[in-house]
Structures are given as C-alpha cells and as structure tokens.
Amino acid sequence: MSVKSKLVFISLLLLINALLLIAASDQLRLDQLTILAIFILAFFLSIVSLFLVFSIFQPLKKLLKGAQQITKGKWNYDLDIHTGDEIEDLAFEFKRMAIELGSLHGRLDQRVQVRTQELSAEKEVSERLADDLKKFLQAVETTSDQVIIIDVDGKIVYVNESVSINTGIDRLKVVGSEPEEVLWAEQTDKELYKKMWETIREKKQKWQGEVVSKKKDGTTFISQLSIAPILNIEGIIRHFVIIGRDVTKEKEVDRMKTEFVSLASHQLRTPLATIRWYTEILLDHQENLIDKQKEQLYQIYESSLRMIKLVNALLNVSRIELGTFMIEPEDTNIIQLLRSVMDECKPQSDEKQIVIEETHADIPVMRVDPKLTRMIFQNLLTNAIKYTPEKGKVKIDIQLKNNKERIDGHQLSNDSLLISVSDTGYGIPKEQQDKIFTKLFRADNAKQVDTTGTGLGLYIVKSIVDQSQGEIWFKSEENKGTTFFVALPLSGMEKREGTKSLS
Amino acid sequence: MDQEEKKHTIFVVEDEQALLDAAVDKLLEKGYQVLTSKTAEGLLLKLSESPEVSLFWLDHYLPGDLNGIELVSRIKKIEKYKNTPTIVVSNVGWSGRVLSYSEMGISKYFIKANYSLKQIIEEIEKLLV
C-alpha cells in the first residue's frame, strides 16, 4: 500500500472513529450494548490507524539512521526497508546515491593520494636538483681551471675563483666587460679572435686555441682555451662557456723536450756520418770481401742512410714544433720543380715498373718557398710510389681553382693551385684515416709493405701546408688507391722569418 | 784525372778524428795532397809554411775560440787565399748560417751525414777544374 493510500485510510478511520464517538454520546440515546460495540470498533480502528502511522514512521526512522551511518562513510550500509511503498523506493534511491557517493569518494581519495605522491616526488627532484646545482657550483668554483661564462654580446657574466687566483684580478670587477679587454692581453693575434667568434657564434661550434692572458701586475701567460656555445632547444645561443688553463709551464717543458730532440739529433749526425763514410770506403774496396760480407756491409750502409733520414725528419719536426723554420718565398716555376722531383723519384718508380703520369694546366710563376714546395712533392710522390704495388700507376695533376670551388667534397678557402697525387696503391684503412697526419703514425698496411718509413712525412707536409695557409685532404680506399689533394693559395706563401730551414 | 790536378792541396779542418781520417784517406786515394788540422788556430799556424792550398774543407763547430765562420773571414784576409774555393762540411744546416757562409763567398755547404764522401769529392773536383 502506498503512503498516500495509508494516509487517506488513516484519515478515513479517524473520521469514522469521530462519527462513532459522536454516535455513542447521549444525543442518539443508544442502548449500552451498541455503545460498547461502538467503543470496541472505535478502539479497533484506532489500533489500525496507529499501525498504519507506525508503518510510515518506522522506515523513516530507519532512513534517518541510515543517513547518519552513510554520513560516517559507511557507503554500503544496509537500510533494511522493505515497505513496498514510496519509502522503500526512497530508500532504494538513497542507497544508490550512497553507493555512488562512496565510489566518488573513493576515486577522490585515490586522486588525492596520487597527487600527494606526485608532490613528494617533485619535492625530491627539486631537492636533488638544488643539491646537484650546489655540487656543480662548488666544482666550478674550486676547479683549478678558469671558468668564464659570457653572454651573447661577449660580455662576462661569471668568472670562477680560479681566474682571480691565477691573475690577481678582482673577479667582480670583470663582470660586464669583454674578456678581450680585461683578461686577455694585446699580444693575442686579432685574427685569432675573429676566427674564434666566427666558430662559436656563426658556426655554433666549439673552438679551441691559445691566447695570451694577462695578470693584474701586467705579466702574461699562455692560456689554452676551450669555448663552447650553449644553445637552447630552438638552437639559439644563450651564452658561451670558456674553460681556460695556464699552459705556460707545459709549453716550456714541451719546448725543452723538442730542443732536446733537436740537440740529440744533431749529435747523432756525427757518428752517423762516420758510419756512412767508412762503410762507403769499405764498399769502395769490396773486391777483397766475400759475397756475404759485401751483403752485410751493404746492410750497414742502408741502415745508416735510414737513420740519417730519420734524424733529418726529427730535426724538421723539431723545427716545426719550435716554430723556428723559415718560409722564404721566391718566384718559382712549379712545373719545373715538380719535374725535378719526378726525376729524383725515377729510380724507385722504374724499379717497381710504376708509370708516373703528369698533367697540368697553364701554371703561372708562383711566389712560394721552393724548398718547402719540393718537400711537399717529394713526400707525396715517394709515398705514392712506396705504397703502390708493382706495375701500378701514379698520377699527378696540377690545376688552378677558384675560391669556394668544391673539389671532391672539399670547399676551397682561396684561389688555389691544386696539386693532386693519386695512386693505385694499398690505400689507407678507413679506421685509420683520421690519424694519417699524426706524428709518427703509420697505417698497419703501410708498415707491412715497408718497414723503413718514419711516420713523419705527412705530418711535415701538413705542417708546411698549414703554415702556408694552404689546405690538404685526401680520399682513399683500401686496395684501390689514394689521392692526396694539396691546395696552395695562388697569392703564394707569406715570408716568415725564422732561424732554421727544413731540410 | 790528369797529372796536373793531382797536385792540388786540400786543407781539411775537422775535429772528429775518425771523420778526418776518412776524408783524408779518400782524398789521398783520389790523388790530392792533404793538410789537416783539428782546430782553426792550427790551420792558421800551418798555413804560413805550407805549400799553396787549392781548397779549404772546413767544419763549422771547432774546438778553440774560432768557429768556421770566423775562420773563413781570417782566411779571406790572406791575400793569396782571397778567392780560394772553400767548402764547409758541418753537421748543422741552418739556413741563417748557410746564408752567412754564402755571403762570405763559401763555395758549397754540406751537411756531413747527408752526403757521401764521393758526392763531396765530386763537388771538389768541379770546383778545382
């Protein structure tokens, strides 16, 4: 029965009761038995209405109690209302709402938990970052290397303590100035700065080099610098980091070592000359020797020549490294020079039946150091012959090329005389190609075919080419051959005063 | 080589005994007359009483107060040796030094180890023609 019906029914019962009670009063003058019956009926009806009232209020009470339990978080509390009326419906909806609320609450709880975890992780990260930052700062502050940070305009924004320790300059005072003004001395070549800025600012590449640094007291020292541009995600430069180190002592030690090599090499020349000359005299009178002795003597002679060659190469290297070799340009006929080198190499190429092919454009007289140019030709040509198997081919070509012209993937930086020497030889193993100009380095396959090389020739050639503002590069494939390219500026070599020449 | 040429006297100054001996042996073998000294001073002393020298063979580094360059300038001051061919056979070959020698009229500069005796003597023969 619905609540509405119950209420109507109760009202009806109460009305009947009232009528019965009026009837039972004196006005109708009913007999006693009827009155008693009326009372009994009225009593019964009252009981029924009371029951009906209870049947409405009891579930409402349960509902109230349920609401209280749900408020406490008992989302699944059983209301236990089975009245079959609107109250049961209400209870059902109520329960559904409670369950929904419960799950919502649960989800919310979960989210709060996750967020709390996230926050604590974030805190940990930020603490760790702060800690890292502190460590980095300490490292930068206490390192013996000089660390300088400059902004995109080249102004100092930070220098570490080492700068102050090394130079005596108050580090706070240099902030806002350019390092060229306050830290580096005028002795540094202006061209060097130009190249440096070009590399780090325009090419956005690392730059390494040496500058003359100054101290507060006016004295200077040599700093080896490594400068790196720091870019943001878009590739825009934010600032530059400079790491500098005082290498004055290292350079001095290095110089002393080189001087020692130079001195020792000179000392070696006298005994070597003695061995050479005496073996020569003995070989002049070999009619008194048996064949085996002749052979042995010849070995001594050859070895002495090899050692003399090595000593000469070492002396050249020491001159290159001491910066004492001179460049003496004079008007030179390049083709004539090349042909005389080719003539010198003829015995070796004939012995191996190697054909040397020479082609050239119309080459004007050039102002180069003929001795140095001869050394370039000699080294490239003898290498080509030495590292090409019998009956191979060596090609020399000399052309004039324009600035910016691309040759075999290499872009020229000057109007140049391009010398290329190619062979059909053993080639340079790919993994060793980057070391080929390194002092004393010899490729594995080269060592196998010829044990007498010094590993100094290409180093010397590269040094000469570099000092002449020229360029050198090569392409090579193992067992196919190698081509060396040398580009010398058509403007010629610049004169350089020095005490010694390369020989 | 004819009889005339064999009479040439070559004065060798070299402080290294072994090298001096080798040079002398080879020169004698080629028919030259040879005078020797291990020092610059020794040469200057011997020069006054020796037969006329056709060619000087000098080392650069020498014991004593005079080096090769100073020795050459002393020799050039002697009237009869003013134009006598002179070669320097040294173990250093710096351009600056070679230049000073050539300015003094030195005929040829050799780095010892880089030349065989034969090559040096061939040059001497050319100078004495």
Image (cartoon, coloured by chain):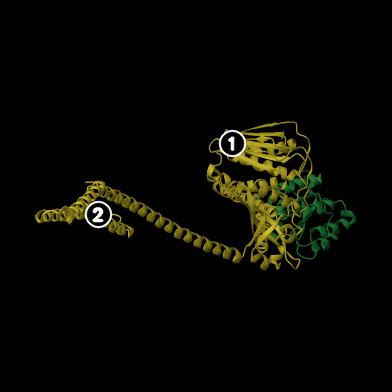
Q: Is residue A31 left or right of residue A275?
A: left
Could you tell which of marks 2 and 1 lies nearer the N-terminus?
2
Residue A495 drawn at (x, y percent):
78, 48
Q: Residue at x 68, y 37 (%)?
A: A419
Q: Which residue is mark 2?
A: A59
Within 10 Å of the Cα at label 2, are there few (<14), some (14-19), or many (20+) other Cα atoms?
Answer: some
- Foreground residue among A269 and A420: A420
Residue type indicated by callout 1: Lys
Secondary structure beneath dot 2 equals helix
Within 10 Å of the Cα at label 1, are there few (<14), some (14-19), or many (20+) other Cα atoms?
Answer: some
Residue A128 drawn at (x, y percent):
50, 61
Residue B61 drawn at (x, y percent):
75, 60
| Chain letter, green in picture | B
Asked whether residue A268 is in view, the answer is no
Asked whether residue B77 is in view, the answer is yes
- Foreground residue among A82 and A386: A82
Residue type indicated by callout 2: Pro
Residue A277 drawn at (x, y percent):
67, 52
- Give the CA distance from mark 2 to mark 1: 119 Å
Q: Which residue is mark 1?
A: A352
- Foreground residue among A68 and A204: A68
| Chain letter, yellow in picture | A
- Foreground residue among B33 and A383: A383
Q: Residue at x 88, y 53 (%)?
A: B82
Which chain letter matches label 1?
A
Q: Which mark is residue A24?
A: none
